[in-house]
Amino acid sequence: MGEFEFDFEKLKVYQKSLDFIDKVFEIYKTLNTEFKYSIGKNLIRAGLSIANNIAEGNDKISSKEKNRYFSISSDSARECVSVLNVIARQKLIENDVSIKMRRDAREITSMLHALMNRK
C-alpha cells in the first residue's frame, strides 16, 4: 500500500473486503442510471462499510468495542447480499456473478466471526 502499513491492512479479512468492494464497483458501473442512484448507491455504501468498520474496529482496545465494529462490518456484508439478491432477481447481473459475490460475502462474515470469537 505504501512505505508502511496500518495494522488493519495486514488482516486477510480486510484484504478480502477490498476485493469485494472492487467487484461491487464493477457491478455498479454496469447498472443503468435508473438503478445506479438508488440501489447501486446502497450497494456501494454497504460495501464500503465492510472495509471501513474493519479499519476502525481493529484499533479499539477493548474486545467488546472491537467486536461492535466487526459486527457492523458483518451486518454490512449481509446488507450487500440482500441488495445483490434484488439486483439478481431483476436480472441486472448474471447468476454466476451473484453466486460469486454471495460466496465472498459469506467468507467475509465467517472471517469476521472468527475474529470476534478470538480470545
Image (cartoon, grey):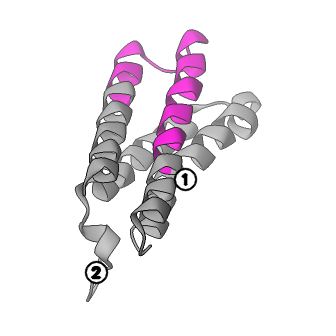
Q: Secondary structure at mark 1?
A: helix
Front in this rendered view, residue 29 or 64: 64
Q: Amino acid at mark 2?
A: Glu
Is 68 displayed left or right of 7 in the figure?
right
Q: Is 59 drawn above or below residue 105 in the view shown? A: below
Is 52 displayed left or right of 17 in the figure?
right
Dominant SS of magenta comes to helix
Look at mark 1 in the image and give the residue it sits on: 49
Quadrant into which the N terminus falls: bottom left
100 magenta-colored: yes
- Residue 28 location (% of width, % of height): 56, 39
- Residue 85 location (% of width, % of height): 53, 18
Tell me if mark 2 has few (under 14), some (14-19) or many (20+) residues whose alpha carbon lies within 10 angstroms of its own: few
Q: Which residues are magenta?
A: 73-101
2 magenta-colored: no
- Residue 117 location (% of width, % of height): 29, 48
Is 36 displayed left or right of 114 in the figure?
right
Look at mark 2 in the image and give the residue it sits on: 5
Q: Is 47 drawn above or below residue 105 in the view shown? A: below
Q: Residue furthest bottom?
A: 3
Q: Residue at x 50, y 33 (%)?
A: 78
Tell me if mark 1 has few (under 14), some (14-19) or many (20+) residues whose alpha carbon lies within 10 angstroms of its own: many
Q: Amino acid at mark 1?
A: Ser
Q: How many marks?
A: 2
Q: Quadrant of residue 55?
A: bottom left
